[in-house]
Structure formats: structure tokens, C-alpha cells
Amino acid sequence: MSVPRWFSHSVLILFAIGSIMISGCSSSKPALTATSRVAEGYGRAVNSYEKKDYDAAVLLLESLLFTSRATALEDDVLFLLGKSYYYSGQYMLASDMFTRLLRQMPSTPFARTAQFMIAKSCEQLSAHFELDQQYTSKAIEQFALYLDIYPVTDSAKVSSDLETYRSLLKLNPENQSYKQNYATALAQFSRIDSVRYAAKAIPVLREKLAKNLFFIARQYVQLKKYKAAGIFYDELIKRYSDTVYVRQAWSGKIDVLVKRQKWFDAGQALDQYLQLYPDQKQQMHSVREQIAKNFSKK
């Protein structure tokens, strides 16, 4: 064999041996599967979230949105991303992500909390009463939906059951029935605070909507557009009779009818007002006389 051919042959053998060695080394550490990569990324995101580094958690979780589809961690990724958006102050994105979770995976164990967080996100987006109240209305709808889907009918009974089964488990820790009933009571008890929150939030948000209508009506009064003002007073009376602004709306309605010289309508409105608020009879005496005097001229 000539020297050049011997040299070339030797090089090929060494190359083959090197390839085998490299292949052997790489096979000792198998490549990560798609599921394991998602799990690894999710673990880092959880670590960032627990450290309250929500922006870092968002970046990690956003990168997993596509690769986590159809894996066991799909709803975990969506739920944690929604919470990370919420706690980083990105409430619109949070609402969208929780909504996406419920749409894609309605049977997720995170469904109850996701529905509550949609409502809270909308509550955070609710603007000052002088501005557009789109998210105020949406927050009311979402809190009402939460109460409808996940009610706690008797919080006192739930608390009593929880304490009962906690005591029974101390006496008999291995009793499966006690364990199951305790877990059920504990799950119900965990909902009590969120249900109470939702129940308290709805009237507060309704007050804001009523205040918004009252503010708009007053603006029209200042512009001397009394008919338009009356429309908003009527809307307030019709939709928010349970708020503190309804009495002022009735008073405002009577005032604009008088200003428009709608004496018959003003008289009817005053009668209704005094039926609702008989203690205002003395204060409205002069208005009654003004209406009666002008109506009699017709």
C-alpha cells in the first residue's frame, strides 16, 4: 500500500472511531422531550412567580404557550400566566388569559379561581366614575356569574362541618369518610372569602354606575339640555333604584320637568317622589305650589 493511500485509510479509520465515540457520549445524555422542556420551563416560571418576579414569570410562560398545548401542564401554564399578568398590573391580559383557560379547558380544576380572577381583573380595569364604565358593567356580570356557578349557601354550616370533621380526624385519623368529608368542607370553606368579596363588590360597582349616570345628567343640566338630563335621570331611576343616587335622581327629574314647563309630568313625578320619600314633603312644598299654580293656568 502506498504511503498516501495508507495515510488516507488511517484518517478514515480515526474519523469513524471519533464519530462512534462522540455518538456514544451524546447517547449517554438523551435529548429533552417536548414535555420535559415544558416542565423545566414551567418550573423556572414557578420559581420566578414565588419570588414575585412576575415579569420574568410572564416571559417564561409566554414562551411555553405553544409547546404546552395538549400536555399535562397546559392549564397550569395558562393559569399561572394569568396570575402573573394580574400581579404585574396587566389586568386586561390577565382577563384574556383566564378567559382563554376556561374556553380551552372548561373542566380544569382552576376553573373556579379563573372565573373569580376574570371578575377581579375587570374590577381593576373599572375606570373613574366620570369615564366610560364598560369594565364596571363587565365586572358586575362576571362577579354575578361567579356567584351563580359557585355559590356557598350556608357559610355557618360549612364552618361547623369543617370544625366537626377536623375534630373527628384527630380521634380517628385513618377514617376515609372523615377524610373525604373534611376535604369537601375545606374546599367549600376556601370559597367563602371569594363569595363574600363578590357579594360586596357588586353593590359598590353598581353605585359607581349610578354615579356615572347622575354625573352625566348634571352635566346636561349645566348645559341647559334638560330633556337629555331627564333621560339620564330616568335611566338611573329605572336601573339603579337600590343605590344612594336614586333620591337625587328623582329630585333632578322633577327639577328638569319644571324647567321644561312640563307641569303635568312634573306633578306626577312629584307625587311618586313623595310616596317614596314622605319625609321630603315640607322641602318640596314650594315646588308643589309652583306646579299647581302653573298647571291651573292651562
Image (spheres, grey):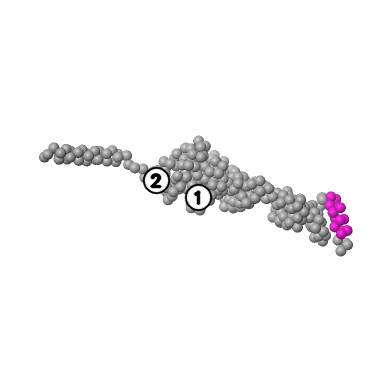
Q: Using the rendered image of the protein, determine whether residue 144 is visible from the camera's viewpoint.
A: no
User: What whole-number distance in Å separates the C-alpha atoms at marks 1 and 2?
Assistant: 19 Å
Going by the image, does 33 lie left or right of 147? Answer: left
The residue under label 2 is 35
Residue occupying the point 72% across, 49% down: 215
Query: In the image, residue 187 lies at what x, y percent?
Result: 54, 45
Going by the image, does 116 lie left or right of 211? Answer: left
**Amino acid type indicated by mark 1:** Leu
Give, as a single range, the part of the protein colored magenta: 281-294
Residue occupying the point 19% across, 38% down: 11
Residue 151 highlighted magenta (yes or no): no
Closest to the observer, 80 or 199 = 80
Going by the image, does 246 lie left or right of 79? Answer: right
Q: Residues within 10 Å of mark 2 (few under 14, many from 20)?
A: some
Query: In the image, residue 240 lies at what x, y percent?
Result: 70, 53
The residue under label 1 is 101
Between discs 1 and 2, the one toward the N terminus: 2
Residue 285 highlighted magenta (yes or no): yes
User: Residue lying farthest bottom?
Assistant: 298
Q: Using the rendered image of the protein, determine whether residue 142 is visible from the camera's viewpoint.
A: yes
Closest to the observer, 143 or 135 = 135
Rendered-image quadrant of the N terminus: top left
Q: Main secondary structure of the magenta part?
A: helix
**Amino acid type indicated by mark 2:** Thr
